[in-house]
Image (cartoon, rainbow, N blue to C red):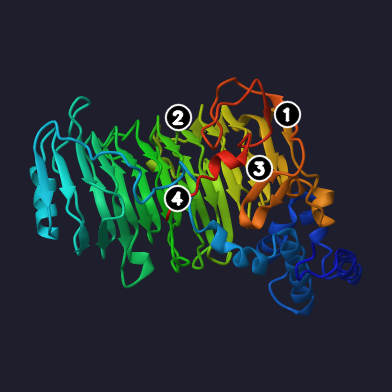
Amino acid sequence: MMSGHLPRMLLLLLAAAALVSGSMLYAIRAIDEAPPRTLGYRIEQRIMPRDGPLADIGYAVARFIADADRIDQAEWQAASHSRQRPLAGIGAAVDDGKPAAQPAGRELLVSTPLQAEQAFEMAQPGDVITFLPGEYRFERTLGPSRGGSAQRPIVVQARKQGTVKLLFATAEAILVEEPYWTFRNLHLQGVCASQDQCEHGFHVAGRARNFVATDNTLLDFNAHFKVNGLENHYPDHGIIRRNTIRNTSARRTAGSVNLVDIVAASGWLVSENLIADFVKTGGNKVSFGVYMKGAGSRNRIERNLVICHDRLQPAGQEVGLSLGGGGTGPAYCRDRRCITEQENSVIESNLVLACSDVGIYLNRAAASRVTHNTLLDTAGIDLRFAETAANVQGNLVDGIIRTRDGALLDTDDNISTPLSRLYAGSHPVRALFGDVASLDLGWSGMPARTPAAPGMPDLCGQPRPLLAAYGAFEDFSACKGMRSP
């Protein structure tokens, strides 16, 4: 389906004419190494001259190629109504039917912002801070003064999802520097006058190990979850599960935009979340859905639905999931060196869609495992630098899988798309499904299969058979028990 694109043959003729005329002589090198959708950026940033008519022609042709590689934006936006609701088991639901947590100690009822601040100060191990239904606006960061314990964590909650909205006009909404705090059923939203002022939803730092956030909705921050070490203490073993994490508008900031930003922490699980719309229009225009870096280890990103641009238009380089991100300064690394950004970490059973750059990026990520992910309408999977060694297996990739700068691909049993077909406008992986734009991901035929660990859950929570379908799910209809947003 052309869906408003120039005919493919005309597109290729334009590109050839530009090459012959000399306006894209340098682009030959870029085409050799870059997927089509990243070509325009590479020409603009690294290859073509910065001014003059030849540069303008070359960039225009590259942009045509990039747009032809993507699902048509008009078609994508027209189908957005069918993607408004999260899939069953992914993201926060208005009411999941689960009872509110019962306190092991006191229940501290909160009905005003001041009471919330006092409750965070007063809370003891085993206490439950319960927000009564309503909307609360905060001009100061909330933060606990003491921690819970493994047997008696401190819980902050709404009794029912969708009944409590916390609005923050602060750089950080909730700062957690103590262990064993759990947050559930809350709605947090940044409402700063300037987007670069609303930095973090949850900032988890230092001694805040065993942090848990589940069944929350977080909107309109630059980093909805920011995790990092502090004074040689590291907030290990956190859980971010079944949250809806997104922005309602593009972030106009020169600062970092990484919705789940985990640095120097180990043993984290990011699972069953809806992570969407992390478009950045300021600064370098580079953004990530999730990254883990800073010499952490044994982290897992699994069973998430990631849509780089869902309700928003793409603007820069949106990357879905990453082990290593853009790298870390030594002072912020767990080992103060960052010889590797990640070790023994896993990206598994995720569905990643609509990214202007790669869906999965590994940067100095040793002993990594990238298995059974589905990437649609992205540039593919990118492994970079000699410190990266990865088992990449069972993935279904609408794009390429490539290694750069000495990265090692241990296993390569995947379905991907050759670069030559991408430049010809051919997307056979998309054709395996009904309609990618509307998330109609029923198989159009019998799926190809590959050996898998039996019983390993797929994106939809179904156990995989011994011979599993390539990609994130066996049967997408198991994910289609749609819930209210």
Q: Residues within 10 Å of mark 1 (few under 14, many from 20)?
A: some
**Secondary-structure class at tag 1:** strand
Task: Please tell me whether residue 368 is drawn above or below residue 313 in the rendered image.
Answer: above
For marks 1 and 2, the one nearer the N-term is 2
308 to the left or right of 43: left
**Which quadrant of the rendered structure holds the N terminus?**
bottom right
Amino acid type at image mark 4: Arg
The secondary structure type at the circle numbered 3 is: strand
Report the front residue among 344 and 52: 344
**Residue occupied by mark 3:** 381
Question: In the image, what residue occupies the spot 57% across and 67% down?
Answer: 313
What residue is shown with label 4?
Answer: 483
Q: Nearer the viewer, mark 4 or mark 3?
A: 4
Q: Residues within 10 Å of mark 4 (few under 14, many from 20)?
A: some
Q: How many marks?
A: 4
**Of labels 4 and 2, the one closer to you:** 4
Residue 166 % position (x, y): 25, 58
Label 3 Cα neighbours within 10 Å, binned few <14 / some 14-19 / many ≥20: many
Between residue 452 and residue 423, name the one nearer to us. Answer: 452
- First in sequence: mark 1 or mark 3? 3
Residue at x 79%, y 55% (from the top left corner): 31
Q: Which residue is mark 2?
A: 297
Q: Determine the residue positioned at 39% across, 49% down.
A: 93
| Dot in front, 1 or 3 | 1
**On the rendered structure, is 59 left or right of 163?**
right
Amino acid at pointer 3: Ile
